[in-house]
Amino acid sequence: MASITMAQALNAALRDALKEDERVLVFGEDVGPLGGVFRITDGLTRDFGEERCFDTPLAESGIVGLAVGMAMGGFRPVVEMQFDAFAYPAFEQITSHVAKLRNRTRGRLTLPMVIRIPYAGGIGGVEHHCDSSEGYYVHTPGLKVVTPSSVEDAYHLLRDAIDDPDPVIFLEPKKLYWSKADADLESRAVRPFGRAEIVRPGRDATLIAYGPSVPVALQAAEAAEQEGRSLEVVDLRTLVPFDDATVTESVNRTGRCVVVQEAQGFGGVGAEIAARVQERCFHLLHAPVLRVAGFDIPYPPPKLEHAHLPGVDRVLDAVDRLQFDDEPDLYHAVTKGATA
Amino acid sequence: MAAKTPRQRVQSLLPALDPVRFLPAPGHASPVKAPDDYALPSDELLLEAYRRMVVGRRFDTQATALTKQGRLAVYPSSRGQDACQIAAAMALKQSDWLFPTYRDSMALIARGIDPVEVLTLLRGDWHCGYDPNRVRTAPQCTPLATQVLHATGMAEAMRRKGEDGVALALIGDGGTSEGDFHEALNFAAVFRAPVVFFVQNNKYAISVPLARQSAAPSLAYKGIGYGVRSEQVDGNDLPAVLSVLTTAVERARAGDGPMLVEAHTYRVEAHTNADDATRYREQDEVEAWRAADPLGRLTAYLRDRGLLTDEIADGAHAEAEQYAAELRTRMNADTAADPLALFDHVFAEPTPQLREQRAQLAAELAATETGGD
């Protein structure tokens, strides 16, 4: 088993998909000879030819709209949006067509296509390069939304996404592109698509995380272990479909839950998860479900992103508020409720 | 053949200065001589177009009547654009693809699609009533200009698969202001996709007149910036529209790349039955365009040439009446849409959450049926 980066794992997934299915096409901005700004498509045009991996004009709605037509015509397009915020011009195509065509036509026209989007921050990117845009996509019925946190999962989830009969928004955490690990690229069926994974077992509380926040949650669990607290970490892997079963089972067992996301908190994925957990686990919860998130601000400039991104300390502070000492959590009552 | 000079290249992309026209029109005493590129369609084709226009016009008035009777939620009439609608359908082979908007129902029935399936969207039973793969016609598109990119993608898919199919995208004057229209022209030109962009310039985007929509000399000039060959045509002149569209489609099929065609026509009715056109245009203007009615002009031409006999005309009108009568009967039958079908095609397989919600709705419906609450 070789040690590779997440970027290499994603490249391998595209390669293997191109090899196995001649309907698969890769296109977008700079994905050809350059290999993409993050080199995820490195060498694909060289090895598979212009017909299979090609550059398009610089227009994101055009890229996605073209992919819709090509998928209607029998291809399985895998398109790249260069950055999270650069995908917004394609929003109408994604929400009005990609997400709805199967439904509008009662299953007669389907869109097996993947929209790859490098997302989230932590790489010192300037404005418009670091958005956590998952909330927009999960709120759109008809889209599957996937985000890997590990090298191995990056490969398998992308293969699954390309094989999927439905359109998939594939969110790649930029800051993990260069993370390195031993990866088994052979065992495709180990983690079924749509299932979350308990990536660290624990007893005292459940941390629910996805994509770029999974390593943060794991580090927090490691630090908590030093303090004698055993935290379980759930990696959601797919936000849609959402794996209520794994999440509910874990929280029912630990009785406490913190959701960790990098995105701004208001109206976000963490809010949805917190609501679902309270609905399903209320009688076994020892404390309110808490969210750890970015602030409700436009993404900060590079020198200030450290203040915005949820880190280990913010996670551990939340864990400390989970009423392990049976004292009520007065955080909001005292600090936030004291309005003038 | 010598390479084109820059001037020749530019001129080869530009539309004719005046719209291509074969038929006499009010204000145009004699027909404009068509460029050599365009041939007058055969007598047989023109008589076929006449028959389809008579049926299409009757379909349109019937659909408007059905709306007044409450059978359709809304109906955007294409009356006045009949020549464009019929020519669009006739320019394509069955194996080509059509990408229509909400106003193109007449083109769909002219393409042979079951009118009840066409009106399913407007009746409100489902979003698209026909099987797009079977009739090689995309669902009628409501978000403006988005379908033009799909047509480009489909054309590119057919080209890559080695099929000789062409995609025809329908769009209105307002739609040419949308970004997707421009992105589609650009993509199509770069990929040399076999797609034809057909702009029905009916002079209004709901209430906004053309002058507020664009300052271009004509909308056909939007092609040259992308390297797309363009033409403008009298949209109420069936022979001209059919000739130009057929030329565009066959050139695309032959590998000459995309083409933009603008038809100058007029939306005689309001935007939909829910719109009040008297708030933004004068009746005199409407009457002037009624005088240039595409069916009237074609009829006069065919009569003048002795091609259209009373027998043929009576036959077409009888067919149209029968078509409308059958449509009335079928549309007046009440349909039962199944609420539980709402969950069937969100994904290939429903998620666990959708299964739960389906069960919830089933319970609500069962409670209603048994009189509970």
Image (cartoon, grey):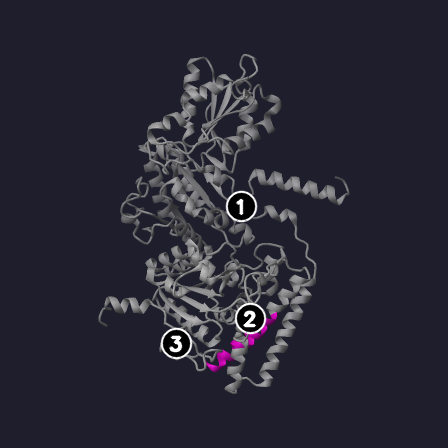
User: Which is more toward the observer, B339 or B303?
Assistant: B303
Which is closer to the viewer, label 2 or label 1? 2
Question: Is A32 placed left or right of A117 in the picture?
Answer: left
Could you tell me residue A240's position as x and y percent? 50, 38
Could you tell me residue B87's position as x and y percent? 48, 71
> On the image, numbered disc 1 is attached to which residue?
B347
Could you tell me residue B368's position as x and y percent? 73, 43
- The residue positioned 36% from the left and 72% from the top of the image is B17
The residue type indicated by label 1 comes to Phe
> On the image, numbered disc 3 is attached to which residue?
B38
A242 drawn magenta: no
Q: CA distance from mark 2 to mark 1?
A: 52 Å
Q: Are marks 3 and 1 in one subunit?
A: yes
Q: CA distance from mark 3 to mark 2?
A: 33 Å
Disc nearer the start of the sequence (3/1):
3
Is residue A179 at least partly visible in the picture?
no
The residue type indicated by label 2 comes to Asp
- The residue positioned 52% from the left and 40% from the top of the image is A139
> On the image, numbered disc 2 is attached to which residue?
B284
Write down the region rendered in magenta. B42-58
Q: Residue furthest left?
A: B2
User: Which is more toward the observer, A139 or B165?
Assistant: A139
Disc nearer the start of the sequence (2/1):
2
> For residue B355, which quarter of the picture?
top right
- The residue positioned 42% from the left and 32% from the top of the image is A211
Which secondary structure, mark 2? helix
Which is closer to the viewer, label 3 or label 1? 3
Tell me the subunit letter for badge 1: B
